[in-house]
Image (cartoon, rainbow, N blue to C red):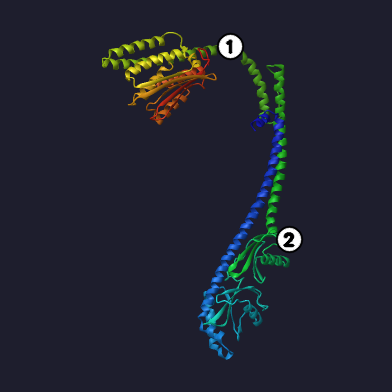
Amino acid sequence: MKKLFRAMRHTSVKWQFSFLIVSLILTLVIFCAALIHSAGKSLLEENLQYVEKNCKDFQSAVSVISRQANSAFTQLQYEKSCRTMLSASSYQQISPGVINELNTALASLKLSNASVADVAFVSGLLKWSRLYLPDQLNDIQAAMPDQHSMAFLGIWYPSSPNRKSPYLVFGCHYYAGKERLGTLIISVDAHSAAAQLPVPQVPGSFLALVDARGSMCTFSDSQELSGPIVEELKEIALTGESPGGGPSGSHTVRSDGYIIQTTSLPQIDSVLLSAVDRRTSQMSLDSVYAVSGAFLAVFCVLLFLGGALLYWSVVSPLNKFSGAIAFVREKKLRKLEKPLDLDGCTEIRTLGEDFSNLLVSINCLTGEILQQANALYEAEVLQKTAELNVLRSQINPHFLYNTLELIRAAALRKDTEQVSLITSAIGKIYRYNSKGEPFVPLSQEIDIIKAYVNIQQARFQNRITTLYSVSKEAAGVPIFKMLLQPLVENAFVHGLEPKPESGMLYIGAKAEDGLLCVSIRDNGVGIPPEKLEEIERQLAAKSADTSSHLGLANINARLKLQYGEKYGLSVSSSFGDGTCVTIRQPVCAGKGDR
């Protein structure tokens, strides 16, 4: 991908412009297609969720109706007037008082169970109901199983022409002891508000309840279902399969484009079908198609107009400008015979004028630049030499001060042998530092470090173990004189001296792939995190702060000034577990390298 981008970046502006226009059009087309697909998928998922919600709401409502019907049967079992009605062997036994008591009981029953639309009494003598004719009551009673508990008898439509609503019918035998006196039949108007059965509010959706006999009632807010779809729904409910032979559970009636969810309602031995008309849902997608198409058309027109304007005002003048630059390069001209005229936008025209003026200015300034180049180079060399001399002069007093402190401490202890050893070593080190070239092989620097370590060993009574590991390749690499001594001194003073037990100092160097790495590591007390963060911040600063941490700051500054920013000094430390200082410089380094 990176190579492709680089290759495109190096092509002409005209080709890049054409690629951009085509990419924008393709992106927009893909976006519109993805938007339409996503909208259709989201709409389908929303329809399925709505269907499932309708089924759950209907199941809950049916459970409430069943409990209310069972409660009504229980209440009627204890009504004396009900027993009188069902146990009567002749109509003379049913007095007006009994009827009044029964009407009062039924009125009270409907107050406590608002969903109950009618209570029918069926016995050997009596066929009494406000909804059904005697023959229909006989059919309903015949559907009643031989059981003591309540049973759902199905969906019934009254034979009366004034009653067109479907009713959910429940039945229960009435017993006096072990003798069955008759049957109580309770009807609930499925479309009444008291039944609280949900009615879908989304256009094109409906619910259909089908009982075991194939009788069906539908719930829809706006439409009447056609005969073919009604028969198709009955077939799905009774057989458990769609007309196409699909599995039960969720079916798509392809002939009419419905999404149908079937749910078994075992408490009333029926099947609930929740359906959504996909054609109605598709109408909302048509508006998405129209808006997307219009947007795409408007965008293409605007893109064409904008592209044409951009081409003639920017791309074409830039091609002309590019040709002018190629002509100047080929002919090696310092100025144009006449100003470059770029016919484009204001910025492009200004660019042409500035280019012409630039060539004139370059021609005038070239001579001045050549004259000043030598002067600037000489000044830079002098400044660099002066900075290096200042840094070296800072290191020498620092080292001498700390060594004199060691001599003073030995003198106070009256250890003349140690004073002799230290003064001899300091003399050797000072002669090494004050004479000769500023760059020495690493092996000579290691010899001076060993002299310094011997002084410290006398001070610490040989409780510090020192290890050296310097490869042959690294031993001959030239480095700054007195580069390592301040770092070894820091390891003793700040790392190993505060540590009460014995310590270890490691000095190693290796040269690989043109890079010299020198490491000075101790297992002393380490550097606290906040102090280490401060040191790292000072080492990363562009200008060296020599007011504190002279050894670290000055060494890092000397290396960067001599060899460049990618070389220098780094510090790593774990508080309580020692510190490691690493120096990195080029292998072929010397007096004039940078």
Q: Is residue 518 above or below residue 577?
A: above
Q: Nearer the viewer, residue 68 or 150?
A: 150
Q: Position of residue 283 (x, y in %)?
A: 69, 56
Asked whether the beta carbons under mark 2 and mark 1 sit within 8 Å of each other, the answer is: no
Q: Measuring 34% from the left and 10% from the top, which residue is drawn there?
A: 424
**Label whose residue precedes the other's in the sequence (2 or 1):** 2
Q: Measuring 58% from the left and 11% from the top, which residue is drawn there?
A: 371
Q: Is residue 581 above or below residue 136?
A: above
Q: Position of residue 8 (x, y in %)?
A: 68, 31
Q: Measuring 65% from the left and 49% from the top, which residue is drawn there?
A: 38
Q: Is residue 383 visible?
A: no
Quarter residue 217 falls in: bottom right
| Secondary element type, mark 1 | helix
Q: Which residue is mark 1?
A: 371
Q: Which residue is mark 2?
A: 255
Q: In the displayed structure, does residue 127 sit left or right of residue 483?
A: right
Q: Position of residue 372 (x, y in %)?
A: 57, 13
Please, what is the three-letter code of the amino acid marked with disc 1? Gln
